[in-house]
Image (cartoon, rainbow, N blue to C red):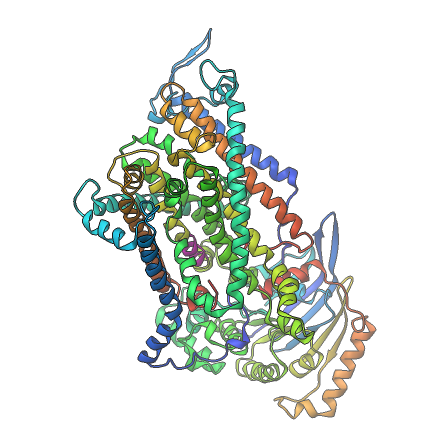
Amino acid sequence: MTAAAPSVGVPVPPRPGRMLRVARSLRYYLPAVVVFVSVIAVWELVTRALQVRAFILPPPSAIGAALVENWGAGRWPLFDAARMTLMEAVGGLLIGTAAGIVVAFAVGRWMTARDAVLPFAVAANAIPIIAIAPIFNAWFGITNPMSKMMVAALLVFFPVMINVTRGLTQVEPSALELMRSYAASEWTVLRKVRVPNALPYFLTALKVATTLSLIGAIVGEYFGGSSNVIGRVVVQSASSLRFDVTWAAILLGAIAGIVFYLAIVVLERALIPWHASVRGEEHA
Amino acid sequence: MTDSAPPASVVRVRGLDKQFTAGAGAVTALSGIDLTIAAGEFVSLIGPSGCGKSTLLRLIGDLTPPTSGSVEVNGKPAHQARLGREYGMVFQAPVLFEWRTVEDNVKLPLELLGMDRSERDARAREMLGLVELGDFARHHPYQLSGGMQQRVAIARALALQPDILLMDEPFGALDEMTRERMNSEVLRIWRQTGTTVVFVTHSIPEAVFLSTRVVVMSARPGRITRVVDVPLPQPRNDETREDPRYFRVVTEVREALRAGGGLGEEAPLASEERVAAEGGIG
Amino acid sequence: MPPSPPAERGWLQRGLVFVVFLALLLLVWEGLKFIGGDPWRTETWTWDPPLKIWFASDLLLPHVWDIFGALANPVQRGTDQSLAGFLVGAAFYTWREAAIGFVVGAVIGIGLAALFVHSRLLERALVPYVIASQTIPIVALAPMIVFAFGQEVISVVIIATYLTFFPVTIAMIRGLRSPDPRAIELMRSYAASRWSVFWKLRMPASLPYLFTALKISATASIVGAIVGEGPGGIPDGLGRAIINFNSQYVSGPEKLWAAILACAVVGIAFFLIVRAAELLALRGRGMRPEIA
């Protein structure tokens, strides 16, 4: 659990003042902000100067305008589209996560099941699962959001299942010996050691899963479905050569992904403040 | 600890053999071990890598079953003693749960015992006071140094007020100065609690300084070659380390180790020790 | 303590367990059809399943043997190319696109990571975007790129490159930073140049991280290729095959299933190639826990 780290030393040093910290993090992120602003500026200038293929890569201002213009009205009401896609993604995330956890507990409990299932799960992870999207369209109905949810759920299932299984089983042997010396039951070991140990693994999987659920939903939509969803807006607006709308839709998908991810980071800080990944001792 | 008078011997090991299956064949880790430890003793097990001293400790703690022979603790089989929660165990790594605060780590065995909350709080406070970490109760393990983490592990082991404390190279990962301070600390706790201690170590000075008896073991197969009494007066302190009698006993243990082939060439790690070592560091 | 369970069982045994699991899966598949599918007919015998499970019909879940049987049939009426032949060709086409992008992406990723490790400023300026880009559904861009670069192989290569270099960059930043600081001090004590520290210490130390990322990227690049080909409209590949067979689903559902099977085979094959390279590159390093 706790790696012997004598260098960590005694209590945490007193935190610097709030203002100082804000100033420091501002300075730390300054290069990133500079890059962001200059990329946007160069993009804007270049696309305005060379109008050759500007229809494919519209300037940021045009994308922003398209986003505002199509927010709630027009042929592609983007807000509704994003809401629908997000709903599919969240539904898929919930279904896939629940199934992944249930199977992980079963698999973690029985050694032979683990031997059989883990290689299979790793192989399944190497399959481009989204190829099954058309089948789910046929099964659940092409306009039924359930068909996209199930694609998302299937994508989410494997990383959650694999990671939670690892978290439940890869417990430090001496922690198990300690519990054994207390004559603790298997059930107690599960509650007091395995489940807390699996939490960081689970949250790591969730971070991957949020992105995967959005990919599952959007790619599921590429293969057909009701028109007012992000995936359909992307394909249809592009074939109508309205690339400003296309980019606006992609931008919304990206924002949804980042917000989704940040939500998990917040959850992580609340649930496992003691873990190295939250304390910032790990890079990237 | 118990109302009735404690039995004369806390640990009684008779004709103990332990074999591990390794690949096709079996490796004999321990052979023909007889050992009796009286109540209130402080006994160190010392020997080269692969002599099975950690295995012997785990057999006493019923963490691994013997191939043949018997281990009795407090007059009953070790298995029953474990189910009766009569052990305190300290490993080389602190094995603190990083998701629990220091005091919650100490409370872990008390929760398993089903002790009620107020009693738990009081006992945890008492134990943290004993290892002089009362101010750090609300900290998380990662905020403590290695030596402090190991003191938390000792507090946790003592929380059940065990009849016997098993320590498996608890200070092996600490620097020499911290180790000496921890040694004095353990002696103080031992005097205060009167518990019986079985202590595995690589270090001859540590074994002699702490123990009332030093059990010298040799490898291939692991067996007890000599038991050295340590007639140094209690309480021991920094002056003990400069006492000529102390040096005499250190020399005696060193010669016993050499006679058993324990000094000089390093024995290759037996598989079970490697597993134990990896488990300890992981 | 009990000896730990053998970390790696024989290939044979693991393969066997896998085959048993696969057989079990097929059993469940056909079992579902047996209790809830359409009637089973042979010339002399008919079985009418007692229940109705909606997705177990012959249209929504064809018999396994029908799928494999369809492989031998012509891909379209009036042509003599078999479905199997067509899918093998499409699979190689897709794999080639993905593999080119995979290699280019890996090289870019390693190069970027090497830059970031040596320049804190570049790292602070660019890495937040590399990380943020991991949280957005990049595959969503695939059709866009095909529109931008035309319905050419180059488009799919770009998508696969894109999907590969992000995971590789992030893993390599960690990997190149993974050596023990004492090992770097050791190299300093030999007055080793940055260049030799990189090649003799950082690079070998980062290999396990690299392969972890490459295994993820192998699948991702195939996914990118399929998504780029399909909705993007590139013929010849598996992505287009899925779109085409999807539109013909009612007349021949087995063809779509066979195409999906081909996708699975390509994905697993690519994964295994990377895994084999990993075993070769890391041989003699002993068992390592997965870094993920």
Residue C39, can we see it? Answer: yes
Q: Residue at x 48, y 30 (%)?
A: C261
- In the image, taking residue B108 as reference, residue C211 lies left or right, namely right
Q: Residue furthest top?
A: C44
- Reply above or below: B281 against C107: below
Q: What residue lies at 44% left-to-right and 22% top-to-bottom?
A: C254
> Along the line of sight, which residue is nearer the eye, A160 or A222?
A222
From the viewer's perspective, tell me whether residue C205 is left or right of residue C129: right
Q: Left or right: B99 with respect to A89?
A: right
**Residue A14's image quarter?**
bottom left
Q: Main secondary structure of the magenta part?
A: helix
Left or right, B271 with reference to A165 = right
Outermost residue to the left = A73
Tell me if residue B72 comes above or below residue A6 in the rendering: above
Residue C190, percent from left and from top = 70, 74
- Magenta-highlighted residues: A198-205
Total marks shown come to 0
Q: Residue at x 51, y 50 (%)?
A: C105
B126, A203: nearer the viewer = A203
- Across and down, in percent, residue C241 comes to 44, 28
Residue B76 found in image quarter: bottom right
Q: Position of residue B77 (x, y in %)?
A: 60, 61
- Answer whether residue A60 is magenta in the image: no
C281 is higher (above) or lower (below) than B208: above
Image quadrant containing the C terminus of chain B: bottom right
Residue B83 in view: no
Question: Residue C107 location in percent, x, y?
Answer: 55, 52
Q: Nearer the viewer, residue A214 or B223?
A: A214
